[in-house]
Image (cartoon, rainbow, N blue to C red):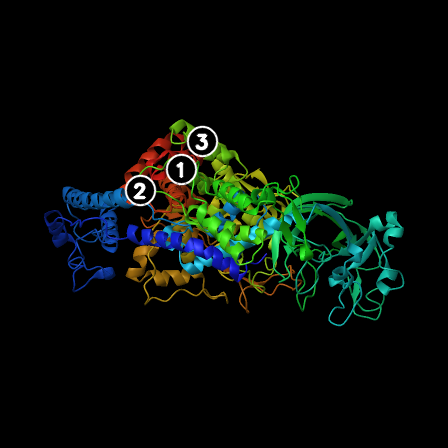
Amino acid sequence: MRPSSFFKRMALMCIERSTLLALLFLCYSSGNLCSDTILPSHGVEPFLEHHCYECHDSGLAKGGLNLKELDRNVHKPEVFDRWVLIHDRVRKGEMPPNKRKRPLANQTEAFIHTISHSLLLEDQERIRKQGRASLRRLNRFEYENCLREGLNAPWLQVADLLPEDGVSHLFNKSGERLDVSHVQMAKYLETAMTALGTALQTVAHPERKSKYYAREEHSMQSFLRYKFGQRAATRSAIPLIEHTPQPNVIRGIDPITVGPEQPAIREKEAMGFVSGTYSATTKYDFTRMQIPVDGMYRLRLKSYTFLAGPNGASGGNDHGLSGGSRAWWKPSRNYAFPGTRSEPITLYALADSGDSRWLTTYDATPDPRIIEREVMLKAGEKLRPDAARLVRTRPGWKGNPLATRAGVPGFALNWLELEGPLHDGWPPPCYKVLFHQLPFEVGEDNRIIVLSENEDEDARRLIQAFIQRIFRKQSLPETRHEPFLKVYQKARSLGEDFTRSMLAAYASALCSTEFLYLEAHPGPLDSTSLAMRLSLFLWNSPPDSILRNEEKLTVDAILRDQTERLLKDEKLDRFVKAFLDYWLDLRDLKANAPDATLYPDYYLDDLLTESSLLETQLFFKEIIQQNLPASSLIDSNFTFVNERLAAHYGLSGRQTVHLAKVTLPKSSNRGGLLTQASLLRLTANGTTTSPVVRGAWFSERLLGLNIPPPPSNVEGIEPDIRGAKTIREQIEKHRNITSCNACHQHFDPVGLALESYDIAGGYRHRYRAVGDLGEPVKGFGKNGHAFQFRLAKNAESGGHMADDTPFEDIQDMKAILLKNPRQIARNILSQWIVYATGAPVSFADRKEVESMLDQCMPENYGLKSLLHALVQSSLFRKK
């Protein structure tokens, strides 16, 4: 249901005042609330005069830093940040540089103490008056989950209707980047109206069951016979009765299906394919299915694998059944055999736009088998199965990497059964949230008309109950419902019916400050605000009734018990996904498509991409739930793989699409996040790898290294895909520039140690190149094209750290990084602080962060221990 201009106008009347108040509060809270804090000259100037001005005065100002003119008033945010950086570099011994005369230890200590004291006073005063974090609204994913919980509609999918949220300190959780403009509010209102309309519409659609046979799908029938632009056996469908092709069905002599008159034969009829689904070529979508409304649906799909005979034909006048151009790797359409193995199948929801959305996976077996899955579907979506291992041909293909002299592997579909939308009772729970037990009628075009004998009395009662449910407070003022009741009354006075007027009132409530904003004042959080913060942290959604009604949540033991309960709930998957999507950029995993020429074995391999994403999510969740050391993020003796990932990692023993935990052999070059395919792909560009990019990214995300942007006058390095020069040779010239090496020496080594991993995380000994240099490689890619790349120079993964510590490979690098497990723990804790509270670790927070680390050191900085320590800390329990 799309919101009309009338509903927008009515609801905006109600939210306008509260939105303006929120904006005013935000502006006020970010203003100058503290008095000036000036660095004392006697504690600063002598040190700067003797050790700093030589390089950082108005004449030279190395690195753009002029200390003589730098303001001493650290009350100004930009000045405060600059002095924090100066403090940290002097404390670490990076400044003054080693080649300069070093100050005495007591001089350095006195200088650091002077700056630290002033910075600490300023930061503590800011936190006392403003709180650590600024006021913020829900981001779009939190808003979607709040709608799901509030409307009792867990299948709602509306986040994509909202604009992308701003990002600060890697995450979409900071008020400084979460807009509160009227434009933004209008989008939230539109989304609220869509969600309400969808929830109401469920009562027009009781559960029903429908069956769709593959033989009757026009999308599959179109691949039966050769036609202009499609005269290839590899891209065609094969009608099967179990494992026996039906040539006369292809020729049009026999009917495509026997129909309902012969149910036993109809049950065995199938459509077989030897290629994976690709939107530009072969597709075997179920397009006749009807999804009338968003909701949860049960899918039952019957399918199996087969082996098409070899020596098939393309072209000719008999649809490849006789004549034509034959080759051993082309599938026969005349004879077939039982499958020799299972095939990984991915199911996608297919929108009218052609966009697909991942739903689930399963293994199709040689014996026909029925699988069952419950999935969330949106109105109008169709189902797209994909035999993900099979070839995906592109124009000009000359082979099939999976074909053998014995035959060509394939996948056959019998039928799809669809049941839904599934309801937990009748009327559906989401209808009861809106209109309780009021009766209704389904009018023309499935328009829902709610019936009330006393509309005004019901309106007051329903609105009061609705806001009590969604506002996440244990009690509300008796008159809090009145602004929303006025929206209802105004709508009625303008001629709208009871149902639409109620939806307008509900929509205005879903865009009010109580629902949209996280309410908190500087100082300790009360039980209600603490419950919301904890739930948004670990579930990315509002608290359930147990957490919401816990009045003693501020008690340490109770807070710990509730935290443990949330960690064991399946909603923890929301946290894992949301956190990793931003901390590790997993939301951008598909942005860098592998190059079709250099990496045809990865090109179009969605199964590898999707499996690598699941590996990282399962791995991170395992570390938390098992309280494994933070060092496991760098190296571990386990990971999660399926058949595709196992082959990618050089492991054996699995033939299933489902990921499971495996122990890595001691000789494995895997373990930890550093060597996972998802992150290695994210840090490449689809064509080449760059130690600079990888080194900077991993050093920032896993180690917490603060890396400034590169100078504007220094050009980046463009890898040579011809194979004449390695990236290492180019980097060595680049690092000879002193201003570059000052930073690069700290993160380039991490990237160099990863040079044995290609653009998709495969282990390599040599680089790939195009052109005449190097050795040719025989084989075919997933796109059916013969390999054109060559093996060029050796990939070297050794080097020296900034302190000249040598390393030969990634194992050596991991050992070096693991010498400082506290830094790894400090970084993940700091990332969680931003994600959970909306604010980064400030200067005044540092002492408490170190205290948390001390507390968790006996457990080797276990991730669950760190998480509990954070939740118990004042950083988490104060605004």
Q: Which of marks 1 and 3 is nearer the N terminus?
A: 1
Relative placement, left or right, of 352 versus 42 is right
Q: Where is residue 81 in the image (x, y as percent from the top left)?
A: 26, 52
Assign a secondary structure to mark 2: loop
Q: Mark 1 points at which residue?
A: 530
Q: Name the residue under label 3.
A: 550
Q: Which amino acid does label 3 sit on?
A: Glu
Relative placement, left or right, of 70 versus 22 is left
Q: Position of residue 254 (x, y in %)?
A: 89, 60
Q: Position of residue 682 (x, y in %)?
A: 49, 55
Assign a secondary structure to mark 3: loop
Q: Mark 2 points at which residue?
A: 522
| Residue situated furthest bottom in the rendering | 228
Q: Nearer the viewer, residue 764 or 748?
A: 748
Classify 10 Å Cα crowding around label 1: few (below 14), some (14-19), many (20 and above).
Answer: many
Q: Which amino acid does label 2 sit on?
A: Pro
Q: Nearer the viewer, residue 401 or 259?
A: 259
Q: Earlier in the sequence, mark 2 or mark 1?
A: 2
Q: In which quarter of the image is the C terminus?
A: top left
